[in-house]
Image: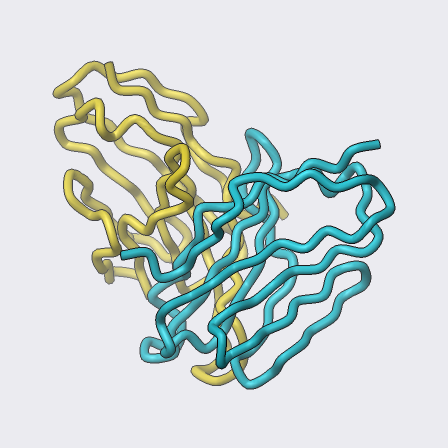
């Protein structure tokens, strides 16, 4: 099992350029998430999806858009990249059996390092 | 305002000794707490969790303690091994969405195990 796969692993952009990060999971998980990690800031939630065709905003959604057209894929888009979006981006997925059945254990990908010049 | 706080950016412990990583939280609606471990250039991996109705959960060398009245939890690693050197994140989920709306993470503590 590959688990959660993120592409690309590295990317350098110029300010104003656009790009899309792809996340794919092969665990048939219902829920998917995009986080960003910045030095000294921990992981912050950008957007998430609780099922195919649904998306919702997280803590830091501005400047990003997402789409979940297929259950296994969750795309994160930057329409006009800014230096403040230089970060490491992590995708995660999870499955909750029921509302009171346990912790929401997220499985993470290896990360995508984005630099915006 | 940070809802999950890890106030120690780094911690150095001798191999074989106990490592204790601390985490405080402010949101009384959190119903599950999790610890993740992260190596450089890799994604975080799940270590252990605890429900808010428990005060202790143990898995091998890892034990998490929860003090709900103090809104404090800690991760104990005994004995500490060189492979434990990593960044540890404390995370929490709120029950209102069944937890599906993601985890709230602390800033992390870099644990260094000295030989």
Q: Which of B35 and B77 is in front in this view?
A: B77
**Chain letter tied to cyan:** B
Q: Where is residue B74 in the image (x, y as percent from the top left)?
A: 61, 63
Q: Position of residue A45 (x, y in %)?
A: 32, 51
Quadrant into which the C terminus of chain A falls: top left
Residue in view at x 58 percent, y 74 percent: B66
Q: Where is residue A107 in the image (x, y as percent from the top left)?
A: 53, 53
Q: Report the colour scheme.
A: by chain
**Chain letter tied to yellow:** A
Quarter-of-image position of residue B93: bottom left
Q: In this view, does A63 lie above or below B58?
A: above
Q: Which of A10 and A74 is in front in this view?
A: A10
Residue in view at x 13 percent, y 27 percent: A80
Q: Is residue A55 above or below residue A11?
A: below
Q: In this view, does A102 lie above or below B53?
A: above
Quarter-of-image position of residue A82: top left
Residue in view at x 21 percent, y 56 percent: A57
Residue in view at x 27 percent, y 57 percent: B1
């Amino acid at each position: 099992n590959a688990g959660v796969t993120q592409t690309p692993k590295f990317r350098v952009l110029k300010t104003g350029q656009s790009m899309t990060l792809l996340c794919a999971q092969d665990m048939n998980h219902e829920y998917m998430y995009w986080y960003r990690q910045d030095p000294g800031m921990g992981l912050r939630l950008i957007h998430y999806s609780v099922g195919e065709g649904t998306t919702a905003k997280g803590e830091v959604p501005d400047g990003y858009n997402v789409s979940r057209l297929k259950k296994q894929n969750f795309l994160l888009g930057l329409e006009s990249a800014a230096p403040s979006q230089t970060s490491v981006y992590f995708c995660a997925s999870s499955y909750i059996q029921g509302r009171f059945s346990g912790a929401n254990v997220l499985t993470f990908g290896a990360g995508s390092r984005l630099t915006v010049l | 305002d940070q809802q999950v706080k890890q106030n120690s950016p780094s911690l150095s412990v001798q191999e074989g000794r106990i490592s204790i990583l601390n985490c405080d939280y402010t949101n009384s609606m959190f119903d599950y707490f999790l610890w993740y471990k992260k190596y450089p250039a890799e994604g975080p991996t799940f270590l252990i969790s605890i429900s808010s109705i428990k005060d202790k959960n143990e898995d091998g060398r890892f034990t998490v303690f929860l003090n709900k009245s103090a809104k404090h939890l800690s991760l104990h690693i005994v004995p500490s091994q060189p492979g434990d050197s990593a960044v540890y994140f404390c995370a929490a989920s709120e029950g209102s969405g069944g937890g599906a709306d993601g985890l709230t993470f602390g800033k992390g503590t870099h644990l260094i195990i000295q030989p």
